Amino acid sequence: MMETATTPEVTIARRAPETVMRLSRLGSFHQSRLSFMRVLLRRLRQEGWRYERRHFDIDARGVGVAVYTMHGPDRAYSLVAFGHDLPPEARSDRVIATAWDATFTLFDGIPEASDIARLGAEIPLQEAGRVSARELSVSRANRSVRLFDHVVTALAAGHQPDADLVAGVGYVMRTTAVYGSGKLGAADRETIAMRPEFTPPFQVEMLTVWLIRAFVLDLVEEMARKRAPKTATVIAPDLRRMIGIGNSTGLGMAPFLISHPILFNNWIMAREEALARVRAIALPDPARIARFSAILARARRAVALWQSDHPVQIARLADLTEDLGRLAAHLEGADLATPLGWDALWRWGAAHLHEEGQEMLVSLLLEPHGDLVDGLACCMAADEDAGFTIDGAMSVGRLRAILGDVYGWARDLDWQAAEAQARTWYVSAAKQEPRLGETLHEDLSAYEQPLAPGRDAMRLEVALRDLPEDAPIAGVLLAHPEHRHSVRRAQIAARHSYAEIRDNTIGANLMPIDMLRAKLSFFGAGYFDPRSDRWVRINMFRGAPFPHELHDLPEDDWAYPPREASA
C-alpha cells in the first residue's frame, strides 16, 4: 500500500494517528464501502454466486430446520438453521442464556441428512455443544418483542406490517452471538484464510448473518402462511429490505482492537488511504458530485430513522443531524467542480463539523468512488504472527523515541491518580468472556489482562530511565521480562502507524462502547443504540438485497435507505 495518495498535481497525506486514534473519534465511525458486509456482497455478485434454498421445514410455531446454500465458483457454503419455540420468559440476550428462538451454523459445503441430524443435537446447545471442522460458525438469535409477532399477525391477516413500526425497530430477530475461528470446535481461521472469498476479515461471520436474515424473513412469512393459509400474504419487497438483523454486542468484543494491533492498523490504514485518494482527485466529476449529493440526502433519512435512549448517543445523534443539515446547506453554495474540490469539502468539514459529522463525511466521500477505493479491501487482513517477533537488538534510545512518538499522550496523565487506573480488564472464569472491573471496589490485579498499553508503556519508560542510549533492549528484557508485551507493542506501532489507540483504556472516563462501535462500523453495522456504556444494539444488512435478488438489484446501493420510512 502506498504511503500517500497522489495525482499528478498534488499529494495528500493520510490523517495523523494522533487525530484518528482517539476513542471519541473511533466511537464516531460509520459504515463505508470498505465495511465487510459490503465487501462480501460485492464479491458474491461479481463472481456470480448462486443461491439455493435446499430445505425448509418450519411449522406454525416457527419450529423446524432449513438449509440455505450459496454456490460459488469453487465451493459452496450452507447455513443450517434450527427454529425453536421459546417461552417469552426464557428469552434473554445475555451471554448466560441457555435457550434461543433460533440457532445456526455455517457448514463448509452441502450437508447430508446425517450432518443435519448431528448438528440438530449440538447447535441448539450453543456453548454446551460441540461442532466439527466442517462448521465455520455457530450463532443464535432471539425474536424482537416489538416486531416479530406484529409481522406474523399482519401477514396472516393479509396485511402489510406497519411501515413506521418496521422503520423504528428495523429487525424481527437479533443475534446474540456469531462465533467463528475455532470456537466450540469450529474450523480455525488458518484453515480457510487462504480461500479468496474468506481472505478479507470476518467474511464467514458476515455470510452467516446475511443468510440468517434470509431465513428470518422466510420464517415469519411461513409462520403466517401456516396459521392462515387462505388469507396470508408476503412482505412487499421494498418493505422487506428495510428489515435487517439486529445484534446485541457487549464487552467481549471491546478488547479485540487492542489485542489485534496489526489487523486494526490495516483496517484504519485502508480507510485513511481511501479518504486521502478521494481528497487528491484533481478535478471532481460532475456525475460523482451528483451522486454524492444524492447519497447525502439518503444519509439524512437514515439518521432520521436512527433511535436511541442512551444520553451519549442522543447527544451524538443531535450533533450528526445538525452536521448533515449544515453540510447540505454548504453544498448549495459550494462549487465542488473546481481543482481539488473534494479536498476543499473535507477541509471545510474538518473545520465546521463535530466528530460524528466528520466521520460520516469520510464515508460519504467514498461512496461515489468505488473504482478508486474498493480494491483496498484486499489490504485489510493481517498475518499477525509474522509481526510479533521482538527485535532484541533495538537500542534503548530508539525505543525511547518510539515511546515518545506513540505514547506521548500518556505522559500527560497522572498514573498514580485513582481516575487514571479506575478500571481493570479481566476474563470471567464462568464464561471466558472479557469483563471490566472497578479498581476501587475490587482487587483484580492478579487477573488483569494486558489491555492498558498507555500505562504499561509509561512503566516501561521508567525502567529505561537510567540506561545508556546504545544498550540493546534484549538485556533490558532479560532483567525485566514483565515489559515484553510493551516492547512488542511499541515496535509494532513503530511499523504500523494506526496500531495503537491513543487514549487511556482503563480510565474512569472510558466508554467501552467507543471500541465496540469502531469495530462494528468496519463490519458494516448501523443504527448504534447503546444500552449502557458496555453494550450496544445494532442493525446489520438493513436495506441489503436478499440472496434471491442479489443479481437483480443495483450493485452496492443499499447502505442508505432510498426512500422515506413511512412509504
Image (cartoon, grey):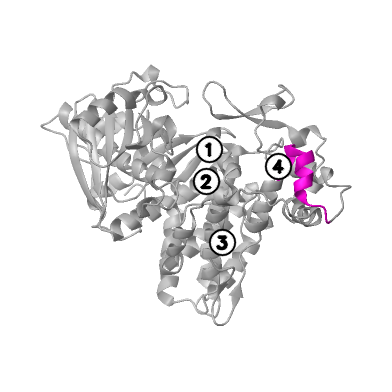
Mark 4 or 3 closer to N-term?
A: 3
Q: Nearer the viewer, mark 4 or mark 3?
A: 4
Q: Give the x, y percent position of residue 423.
A: 69, 31
Q: Are marks 1 and 2 in contact (CB under 8 Å)?
A: yes
Mark 4, residue position: 484
Residue 67, above or below 83: below
Q: Tell which of 162 and 259 is nearer to you.
A: 259
The residue wearing badge 2 is: 519
Q: Which residue is mark 3?
A: 272
Q: Which residues are magenta?
A: 470-486
Give the percent coordinates (x, y) of residue 290: 42, 70
The x, y position of residue 165, in whole percent, is: 36, 38
The residue carrying pointer 3 sits among few (fewer than 14), some (14 to 19) or many (20 or more) residues within 10 Å by Cα, namely many
Q: Main secondary structure of the magenta part?
A: helix
As drawn, which residue projects farthest toward the right? 466
36 left or right, relative to 515: left
